[in-house]
Amino acid sequence: MALFYSIWLLFLARFCIAQSDESDEIDTVGLNAANEVYNEIFNVRGYNRFLSPIYTRKTNSSGGLKTAKLNIHFDLWYIKLISLDAQSQMLSICLELRTYWRDSRLAWNESQFDGVEHIFVYSDAVWLPDNQIGNAKTIDSVKPADAQRLVQIFSNGSIYYPGFYYTEVACPIMISTFPFDKQICPIPIMSLAFDVNSVALTASIDPFLTMYTKPEYINAVAREVSNNEYFAVLTKAFIEWGNGEWDVTNVSTFGTVQAGVQMVRFKSQLRKKT
Ligand SMILES: *[C@@H]1O[C@H](CO)[C@@H](O)[C@H](O)[C@H]1NC(C)=O
Ligand SMILES: *[C@@H]1O[C@H](CO)[C@@H](O)[C@H](O)[C@H]1NC(C)=O
Ligand SMILES: *[C@@H]1O[C@H](CO)[C@@H](O)[C@H](O)[C@H]1NC(C)=O
Ligand SMILES: *[C@@H]1O[C@H](CO)[C@@H](O)[C@H](O)[C@H]1NC(C)=O
């Protein structure tokens, strides 16, 4: 996994350089205000992470029902094929998915909290959607040992949840394309508890994913950071999506509803290296 972390850190470092404040003095006013936001949500309001923001209620005596529907968006930010095994028809892949949704119980008024726009809390403090990768044999969350995941909460109640996964999913090998030199492997994401009336799932491929594998971009990055040893290792081979056997030629996304369950799929097209 060292490879993935390196890539991660590389880009992380890049953003931090671009965005960080020059001063690293502690802004006591801001920190206190952020603490007040936390206190407001989790202590004053008694936010309950065990309760989902999705519910249904009867709106009138003749049984009219109203469901508070949740929009969940998945942004694919990184993908790396580990292997595709023809015998077991299993695709092993690393994915970085950024998940966004909104929980109105977590919103606050910025002007009442010294302008605090967002805070980060450990992910176990908030309710998380139950979305799963479908057809998966294994899903491992990739993170440093003992590290907890964080979520970013914005003042409008929007939540950003980044996750890095290693997964093994079924990929039906297409016999028609014998000698199996091209394959399409869909990676489905669905909710187990919520049907299409309760959640709306959408997905996108982050422009960053396609951008940073373009030679122009790689060369630009390499030039820009030529004095920095951390960036010196960035080469095309290093950040390819495929493995020694397969190239990932395209990743696209589409949504379907099957038996009342909504799914989004990331469809990866693979081509055997010649
Ligand atoms: C009850 O609510 C449902 C759905 O909101 C609506 O279609 C229906 O007309 C309502 N019935 C009455 C009697 O208001
Ligand atoms: C936010 O708080 C400010 C100051 O108390 C108030 O003027 C404003 O109306 C509030 N905004 C909302 C959307 O409640
Ligand atoms: C909430 O605020 C964030 C950050 O400004 C923004 O990216 C997001 O789209 C907003 N969400 C909604 C539902 O307006
Ligand atoms: C990638 O796949 C999508 C959906 O199948 C298609 O619309 C798009 O043109 C493809 N892009 C390339 C570069 O092949």
Image (cartoon, rainbow, N blue to C red):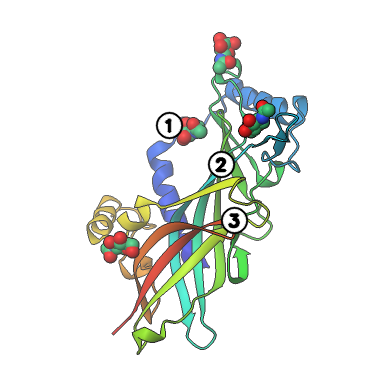
Which amino acid type corresponds to the residue marked 2 in the rendered image? Trp
Name the residue that disc number 1 marks.
22
Looking at the image, residue 170 lies above or below residue 67? below
Q: Is residue 253 left or right of residue 132?
A: left
Name the residue that disc number 2 marks.
101
Which amino acid type corresponds to the residue marked 1 in the rendered image? Glu
Report helix, strand or loop for mark 2: strand
Q: Can you say which quadrant of the picture contains the C terminus?
A: bottom left
The residue under the point 39% across, 51% down is: 206
User: Can residue 237 be spotted in the picture?
Assistant: yes
Q: Nearer the viewer, mark 1 or mark 2?
A: 2
Q: Earlier in the sequence, mark 3 or mark 2?
A: 2
Mark 3, other Cα within 10 Å: few <14 / some 14–19 / many ≥20: few
Between 158 and 211, the one lying in front of the other is 158
Q: Earlier in the sequence, mark 1 or mark 3?
A: 1
Badge 1 vs badge 3, beta-carbon distance below 8 Å: no
> Is the shortest distance between ligand 3 and the CB of mark 1 under 8 Å?
no
Looking at the image, residue 1 lies above or below residue 90? above
Between 257 and 73, the one lying in front of the other is 257
Between 203 and 193, the one lying in front of the other is 193
User: Can residue 111 be spotted in the picture?
Assistant: no
Between 236 and 80, the one lying in front of the other is 80
From mark 3 to mark 2, how far is it between C-alphas? 21 Å
Name the residue that disc number 3 marks.
260
Mark 1, other Cα within 10 Å: few <14 / some 14–19 / many ≥20: few
Residue 210 placement: quadrant: bottom left
Give percent across and percent down for residue 173. 45, 82
Q: Is residue 14 left or right of residue 43?
A: left
From mark 1 to mark 3, how far is it between C-alphas? 52 Å
Which amino acid type corresponds to the residue marked 3 in the rendered image? Gly
**Mark carried by residue 103:** none
